[in-house]
Image (cartoon, coloured by chain):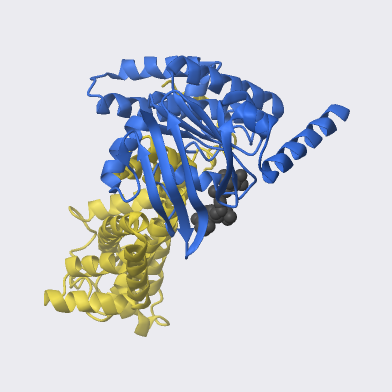
Chain colours: A blue, B yellow
Amino acid sequence: MSLLKVRDLSVAARGRNLVDSVSFTLDAGERLGIIGESGSGKSLTATAIIGLLPPGLSATGSVLLDGHEVIGAREGELTALRGAVAATVFQDPLTALDPLMRVGRQIGEVWERTERRAGRPHGKGDTRAAVFSLMDEVSLPEPERIAGAFPHEISGGQRQRVAIAMALACRPKLLIADEPTTALDVTTQKETLALLARLVADHGMTLLFISHDLPVVAGIVDRVVVMRTGVVVEEGPVRQVFATPTHAYTRELLVAAERFDRALGAA
Amino acid sequence: MTAVVASAPRRGASWTWRIGLALVGLHVVVGLLTLVWTPYDPGAMTGGRLSPPSLAHWAGTDRLGRDVLTEVMIGSRIALQVGIGAVSIGAAIGITIGIIAAFATRWRDDALAATLDILIAFPTLLIAMLVVAASEQASLGTAILALGIALSAVVARLTRILAKRVIQTDYVTAARVSGSSWLAIVREHVLPNIWPTLSVNLALQFGLAVIAEASLSYLGLGAPPPNASWGRLLQEAQGTVYSAPFGAIVPGLALVSLTIGVNLFADGLRDLADPLRRGRG
Ligand SMILES: Nc1ncnc2c1ncn2[C@@H]1O[C@H](COP(=O)(O)OP(=O)(O)OP(=O)(O)O)[C@@H](O)[C@H]1O
Ligand SMILES: [Mg+2]
């Protein structure tokens, strides 16, 4: 059964469609990429999927998340659904963490909530052990120091790893990563991607990966959806779409990426 | 978690909050003392009228021959009651409404915001008079309730704006994705993050409440005699401020020292609550 089924999803602001009749499905264990230039509606699609559109925006169509309809659902149902099914990693690792809460506690809170929901009793020591094990899983060094640090006291790459550890603590079926590496430098970017790929494989998670960076997407997903001005213009297996793009826009994206690569190579 | 970072040396930690603490502490001690002892009986005619400071009357006497120091000391207690009472009521009502507005659907939020703007446009005094009228009898409690209600609108508006900013951050979105209820988000993220700014504003409101109580007293809506508030002392001393300035200077100093003390102390609390500011002078 498909974990996520999006049918004719549109997101409108004051009568204007920012996302227009988007449809795709995501089977359990599959890894899907959404690519497209800035402003093409990738993030709005992702937030509509988990029912978290900002005020003023409204969604129509259908989003079946693990068999439950998200569009039009009450906030109470969504809260229960989200926790059990999906978790998100965002673009900017600094705003993704609460600046006033120590890193270890932020991870611990999520873990405790997940345990509570699953009805598993746990003590203080359990949380501490779980936090360190999660930090180990995302390869965070010096767990003692970092757990006791505030977000501004660790590096950008480390912050993103903390955000990933928090997403992991939910044990989600679906991981939504919205440009998780855009704010990082090239080396950190590679490491973070490798980490995400490993975790998704290890935990058998389903992945929805959003990016405007073609090589990044190609390295981590099986299938891509290409978006432009709120519309899906092309969809298919990564190899096929990149080898034989049928839509002019996809070709443009590929040419731009190649030119960019050559420029890097020449430098 | 072990707090390794917290034990790092605090570079040039701010010291002004200590002055604030000392000033507030002084008023608290004096206020508590008046419950068991004052230099003279409150309201008693103890000497000549409008006499200057002397060994018997450190701050002189007023136009009825009462000891000014005694009155000012009792004023400390009343000021603290008014400030703490009004700010607590205002904070409880204001923070609740502000948070609800911040989380509400769009049109409910708009409606609440408009209501708050209208309430804020009403003079505090008018609201206070309405509350007193509704309760049929002027008392210190009514004055505190009135001031608390009046300042709750300001607190609600600030809370709403601050909370909205927090709610829009990625970490709150991430918490919601991971299934946090909105109450959990308020407790874990919203309140801690708005508190540094809010607490400074509440300290400001404390000072304003103490001053506003003076206006209420002036209209006979404040603390009833013989428990004179600083506001009433100031008002009574108005007519004789040239012949007997101490009757106005001493309560004035008391009022200023308490408001400054509360503000300095609140600044220090804010810095403590905010790790980004901690350790900055
Ligand atoms: N809250 C909002 N209200 C109105 N319009 C919005 C809102 N959020 C986004 N938009 C508009 O919707 C369009 C799609 O935005 P979205 O954030 O989904 O783009 P994106 O593909 O994620 O871009 P990027 O790669 O830059 O993150 C943009 O034109 C944007 O200006
Ligand atoms: Mg985006």
Q: Residue furthest right?
A: A266
Relative to A242, is B158 above or below? below
Q: B166 and B225: which one is in front?
A: B166
Residue A144 in percent (x, y) is at: 49, 17
Please tell me how many numbered marks the rendered image carries: 0
Who's the residue at 45% across and 32% down the image? A26
**Residue beneath the point at 76% across and 39% down:** A256
Identify whether A144 is placed above or below B150: above
Left/right placement of residue B242 relative to residue A158 reads: left
B66 vs B78, nearest the viewer? B78
- Check the picture and name the quadrant holding the C terminus of chain B: top right
Q: Is residue A155 visible?
A: no
Q: Residue B230 at what x, y percent from top left?
A: 31, 69
Image coordinates of residue B225 in percent, x first then y, are: 18, 73
Give percent across and percent down for residue B50: 32, 78
Q: Quadrant of residue B82?
A: bottom left
